[in-house]
Image: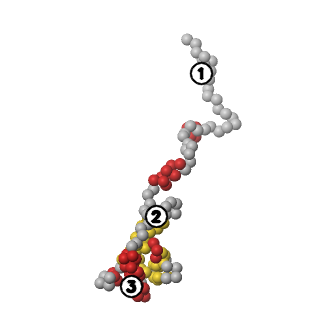
Amino acid sequence: MKGPYDDIIDMPHHVSKNRPHMSAIDRAAQFSPFAALTGHSAAINETARRTDKKLELDEHAKAVLDMKQHILLEELSHCPEVRITYFVPDERKAGGEYVNVSGKLKRIDEHERVLVLTTGERIPFDDIVDIESGLFYGRL
């Protein structure tokens, strides 16, 4: 039986003198899939990411926070230990998340309306939803 390639079937494989031999991995990479929509997956993940809405405190909660800040102001020289819950707005979409931070209070900047911890962290008054400290027991 005679086939169409019988004249070349037993010839040695051609090796180029001008180009280097391509490895099997490089050769396979030519046929690997690619992301036609770059960033599409990241956009879908960003849309699916959940954020919390910022809660508006009622007048009673605002008054309690104000009293806590006054107590902290009186005891500021002792660098009181505090735990603060506050809202951090999301940089990419509406909403944000509530964060808890613990540390020693360094100062209260009433001009800039922030609490400053000894770590240097600055927490805006308007984002604070709760302050906890041992100083408040029996005083509120």
Distance Cα–Cα, label 2 vs label 1: 68 Å
The reply to whether residue 121 is in sight is: no
**Residue 127, image x, y percentages:** 45, 72
SS at mark 3 in the image: helix
Distance Cα–Cα, label 2 vs label 3: 29 Å
Residue 79, compared with residue 89, is above or below; it is below
User: Furthest residue to the front?
Assistant: 59
SS at mark 1 in the image: loop
User: Furthest residue to the right?
Assistant: 18
Q: Nearer the viewer, mark 2 or mark 1?
A: 2
Mark 1: amino acid? Ile
Q: Is residue 42 left or right of residue 72?
A: right
**Residue 29, image x, y percentages:** 56, 40
Location of mark 1 (residue): 9
Location of mark 3 (residue): 71
Mark 3: amino acid? Ile
Choose top left, top right, bottom left or bottom right for residue 35. Answer: top right
Q: Point out the image quarter for the N terminus.
A: top right
Location of mark 2 (residue): 96
Sequence-wise first label, 2 or 3: 3
**Residue 2, image x, y percentages:** 58, 13
Q: Point out the image quarter for the C terminus.
A: bottom left
User: Furthest residue to the left?
Assistant: 138
